[in-house]
Image: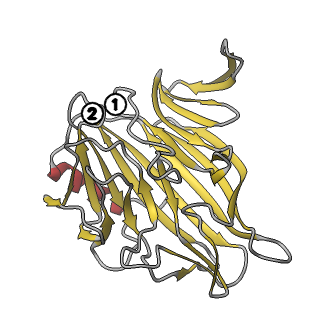
């Protein structure tokens, strides 16, 4: 059974709230969707385009991402990098016919037009589906639409000590010879990224190895744990698992912090652009938001299980 009703708060904002027998539910506003478990917030998905003083227009990203206690783990528009936005995916190089036509990382000459979006409630999970059209303003004539982005975020019912959140991103070219690439330098950053709050005790662990941030990418396993006192109370951890759709068995990570204020990035494809297949490029990731810091063997087990699942 599904029940929907409208809530109007004192300050005039209205939300449409829907739920079913599962405790997973959501609220919809003009800005986007708040996904919850009971009264506990899980994440907010930004649908309506927003800017920072008229710059860095962005849409289709997650902020806040909440921890187990409902505290915020992410940052949006921090002063040091106002184009960073919570959990997001973007590329410095957006090309058409071999020429750069825009930069989706800082939203330069690229705009994001929201399309259809909805939340589907299941018995054991909740799926948010969203569409964006990437528009390249530098195209001088004709249709400026360049890429259709189709996103599915699946929030799974919580286990005892963790919650799984899946991100499935499909980028389909709307013209021939469309490509994306990371920064055109030795760092090559671009792709799925997280702008965490950066606690002083932040650590990066991949495959049981403590990774040290550096200017260029660090090689690790296709999963990583970010551990620290994000909310200043106790140590907690979020792991990111990459679906094995990348060349080779290792993953390059751009890592920053705790002294250098910046984002964390699962590098794809790097500084050399890749042409989007006509059938679309599919990227998949899974987050493990933990109630307590899980042992590395548990994270590895969850990664192996994720690899066996079909793409959503």
Instruction: Please provide percent x and percent y for residue 267.
Output: 39, 69
Q: Which residue is mark 2?
A: 291
Nearest the eye: 181 or 275: 181
Nearest the eye: 161 or 181: 181
Q: Which residue is mark 1?
A: 68
Q: Residue furthest bottom?
A: 98
Q: Residue at x 30, y 57 (%)?
A: 256
Identify the element where label 2 is drawn: loop
* Quarter the N terminus occupies: top right
Residue 305's place in the image compared with 47, above or below, is: below
Quarter of the image where one finds residue 145: bottom right
Q: Are marks 2 and 1 in contact (CB under 8 Å)?
A: yes
Left or right, residue 237 beside residue 104 = left
Instruction: Please provide percent x and percent y for residue 39.
Output: 47, 21
Q: Residue at x 60, y 40 (%)?
A: 120
Marked residue nearer the N-terminal end (2 or 1): 1
Q: Residue at x 44, y 75 (%)?
A: 269
């Amino acid at each position: 059974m599904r029940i929907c009703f409208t809530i109007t708060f004192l300050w005039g904002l209205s939300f449409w709230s829907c739920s079913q027998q599962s405790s997973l539910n959501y609220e919809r506003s003009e800005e986007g969707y708040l996904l919850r478990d009971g009264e506990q917030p899980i994440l907010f998905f930004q649908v309506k385009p927003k800017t920072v003083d008229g710059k860095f227009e962005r849409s289709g990203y997650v902020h806040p991402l909440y921890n187990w206690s409902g505290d915020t783990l992410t940052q949006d528009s921090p002063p040091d990098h106002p184009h960073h936005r919570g959990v997001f995916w973007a590329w410095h190089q957006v090309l058409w016919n071999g020429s750069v036509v825009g930069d989706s990382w800082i939203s330069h000459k690229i705009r994001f037009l929201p399309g259809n979006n909805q939340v589907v409630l299941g018995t054991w999970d909740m799926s948010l589906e969203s569409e964006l059209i990437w528009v390249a303003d530098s195209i001088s004539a004709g249709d400026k639409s360049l890429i259709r982005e189709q996103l599915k975020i699946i929030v799974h019912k919580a286990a005892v000590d963790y919650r799984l959140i899946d991100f499935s991103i499909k980028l389909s070219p709307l013209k021939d010879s469309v490509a994306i690439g990371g920064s055109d330098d030795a760092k090559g950053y671009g792709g799925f990224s997280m702008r965490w709050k950066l606690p002083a005790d932040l650590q990066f662990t991949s495959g049981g190895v403590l990774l040290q941030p550096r200017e260029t990418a660090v090689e690790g396993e296709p999963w990583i744990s970010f551990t620290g006192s994000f909310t200043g109370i106790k140590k907690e951890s979020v792991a990111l698992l990459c679906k094995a759709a990348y060349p080779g068995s290792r993953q390059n990570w751009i890592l920053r912090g705790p002294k250098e204020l910046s984002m964390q990035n699962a590098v794809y494809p790097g500084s050399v652009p890749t042409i989007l297949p006509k059938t679309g490029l599919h990227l998949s990731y899974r987050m493990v938001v933990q109630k307590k810091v899980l042992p590395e063997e548990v994270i590895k087990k969850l990664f192996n299980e994720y690899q066996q699942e079909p793409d959503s």
